[in-house]
Every structure is written in C-alpha cells, then in structure tokens.
Image (spheres, grey):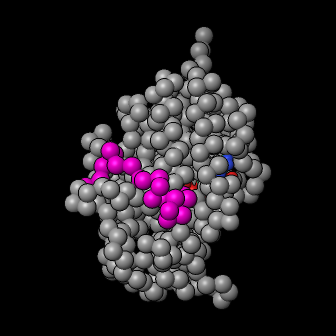
Amino acid sequence: METSPPPLPRVCVTGGGGFIGSCLVKMLLTRGYAVNATVRDPRNAKNAFLMQLDGAPENLQLIKADMLDYDTVAAAFAGCEGVFHVATPVPEQKMVDPQKEMMEPTVKGTMNVLKASSAMKVHKLIMVSSLAACCFNPDWPQDKIKDESCWSDKEFCKESEDWYSLAKTEAEEMALKFGEKNGLHVTTLLPSLVCGPLLQHVAVNTTSKVLLYIIKGGPDMINNKFYPMVDVRDVAEAMLLLYNKAGTSERYLCSLDQMDLKDLLGIMKTMFPNYSYANKMVDVDFNVTFTSDKLKNLGWKPRKLEEMLTESVKSYDKAGLLRVSDGEPCRLPVFFRAPPV
Ligand SMILES: NC(=O)c1ccc[n+]([C@@H]2O[C@H](COP(=O)([O-])OP(=O)(O)OC[C@H]3O[C@@H](n4cnc5c(N)ncnc54)[C@H](OP(=O)(O)O)[C@@H]3O)[C@@H](O)[C@H]2O)c1
C-alpha cells in the first residue's frame, strides 16, 4: 500500500509580498518548506507574482494579516513551526506622523508577532532588524569596529528625528528581551542596504529606488557617505541559516564590506558605462566600520558586490525601470537625501 509523504515543515513569512519577504518566500519554497506568507491585501495586483513562484500552487498560502491586528497575526501563525518577521514599513517620503507611520507598525507590530508566536507555540522566530539598530551610537569609540554588541542610541535617533532607526532599535531590543523572559527562541538579523534582483515590478521598494537613483541620477543631492550593501538573496540565505543554526537571543550583522558612494560609483561606471549616474553629491564626515564576521563564522557566504550589481541592473532593465522618461525625474527616497548626515 502506498503511504503519503510526511507534510512539509510549515513556516510563516510576514510581509511576504515585499522585496526581502518575497525573496525569502521563493527560497523557502525551493528548500522544502510549506509557507504562509502574510500580505495586507491578497487581491492587490502587486502580490500576484507570489502565486507564480515555483512550488507556490502546492505549498504557498497567502494570508491576509495586518501586524497591528493581533488576531490576524495569530491566525497566520497557526500550524507554523517557525516565523520570519519581515513586515515593517520602509518609508520613502518624509513622514507626516512618525508615531503612526513608523513606530506603531514596527514596535506594536513586533509585539503582536512576539505574543502570537508564543501563543501559537512557534519554535523559532527570526526577525529582520537593520544595521540602523546598531550603527548610530555616538558613544562608541571612533577607532573600534562595530559588532553585535553595539546598539544605536535611541535618544540620539530621537534628537536627529531618525524614526526608522529608532523604531528598528526599539523593536529589536524588545524582541530579544521578550524572548529571554518568555522562553521564545528569537534571533535577529541586521542587514545593511539591501539591493539585488527584484521579483516584483509593480511596487518597487525604497532601497532599490536608492540604487536606481544612483544609476539614473536626478535633481537630489546625495551624501557621499558609506554605502554598505548586501544582496537580497544573501539576506534570505542568512535568515534560513539563522533558523537552522543560530542560538537564541543572538543578533547578527549582515553586510558586504562598506564603501563610500564615490567608490561605488567608480565601480558601477566601469561595469555599466552607459548610464548617466547621480552627480549631485556632498562629502560628509560620517563613516562607520563594522564586521559581519559572526554571520560568516556561522557559514554565511555572500555574493560579491559585482554579482549583486549585475543582477540588480539586469532586473531593473527587464522591468523597464532604467528607461529615461519624459515625465517626472527620478527622485531619491527622502531618507537618503542630503542633509541630514
Ligand atoms: N531594504 C533594506 O535595505 C533593508 C535593510 C535592513 C532591514 N530591512 C528590513 O527588512 C524588512 C523588509 O524591507 P523591504 O526592503 O523588503 O521593504 P518592502 O518591500 O517595502 O516590504 C515591507 C513589507 O512590510 C509590509 N508591512 C508594512 N507595514 C505592515 C503592517 N502594518 N502589517 C503588515 N505588513 C506590513 C509591507 O506590506 P504591504 O505590501 O501590505 O505594504 C511589505 O510587505 C523591513 O523590516 C526593513 O526594516 C530592510
């Protein structure tokens, strides 16, 4: 008598329709997982590509959930042994109400994810934090390389009205504390600027717009400051690596080596000489040195910068995003415009 194969392990990815979330969903489907992907609007055309991924018809469920609505979050985690928490806004425009637009979805949203993970007996929660939760710390000695022991200073973020860094720092700190107190296995990943090939072209995410602006140029002034980058596929790999190998309450920085914008432009102009490139640039005295050795020691092997750039440009070209338009000029997302530093 034929026996049916055992069911695949089921995991949930919050924000499954986003840039990083969708890349992770795609990878998990090819690595033997059944996936619940949360989206806020399953019927929105921007999420249609998800059901066309390899393995999606059999093993992907799109689940409508808002991180601010506990019941929808808990329902999405039902039957899941693991959760990858990715959903957080990454604003492109200046925020009118930072509390509502950034702090609440990030901090309250993460608290809902933490409580729902505990309630639904999730074994492991891997959460995407950000390098922004590590690198804004004026008290850190100038000559000391930043590592996972460095946290962004929340007062400093508040004073500089850097709501994104404040929200990511607060949410990550809260998640690690919650895990320790409640016996939930929580591990965090802190990627730098994430670029790489796009799976979805209907809604282009904020950081891909930064690289697009660097390539196409436009009216905005850009800081010549450090641009530590990492490929979205290597972020997804890192998350799965943490899921399988990392301990609880650990954080991991995740980036290629840092470089300033001028160096990046130099590399890009040599590789792709036919674009106009950003040329309005101001030198700023802001540098940061940090290390992703902890993640590399766990087995993380990121792609080279050149491969990430080649695949990014190829995917932008395929999506028609590099065409010169007669209408609106290309704009740099506000968060990256000069000033502030
Ligand atoms: N991109 C980077 O360079 C970078 C670097 C470090 C860390 N990160 C972190 O990585 C994560 C994903 O970033 P991304 O670049 O992939 O951005 P993205 O493409 O804009 O994705 C953000 C996702 O969050 C979802 N979301 C936002 N608010 C939500 C809410 N209240 N309830 C449910 N879902 C919500 C969005 O869903 P909708 O489609 O419904 O809006 C979207 O799927 C974020 O946590 C970000 O902080 C990103």
**Nearer to me, 145 or 142:** 142
Residue at 34 percent across and 53 percent down: it is 302
Q: Is residue 321 above or below residue 168?
A: below
Q: Is residue 258 left or right of residue 328?
A: left
Residue at 34 percent across and 79 percent down: it is 262
> Could one spot residue 88 in this view of the protein?
yes
Q: Quadrant of the N terminus?
A: top right
Q: How many discs mark residues in the rendered view?
A: 0
Q: Within the magenta stretch, is there residue 340?
A: no
Q: Residue furthest left?
A: 143
Residue 154's spot in the image, x, y percent?
A: 47, 53
Q: Is residue 256 left or right of residue 83?
A: left
> Could one spot residue 57 in this view of the protein?
no
Q: Within the magenta stretch, is there residue 148?
A: yes
Residue 217's spot in the image, x, y percent?
A: 50, 83
Main SS of residues in magenta: loop
Residue 338's spot in the image, x, y percent?
A: 48, 78
Residue 69's spot in the image, x, y percent?
A: 72, 40
Q: Is residue 196 above or below residue 224?
A: above
Q: Is residue 189 left or right of residue 103?
A: left
Q: Quadrant of the C terminus?
A: bottom left
The image quadrant that residue 269 belongs to is bottom left
The image quadrant that residue 59 belongs to is top right
Residue at 55 percent across and 59 percent down: it is 163
Q: Which residues are magenta?
A: 145-164
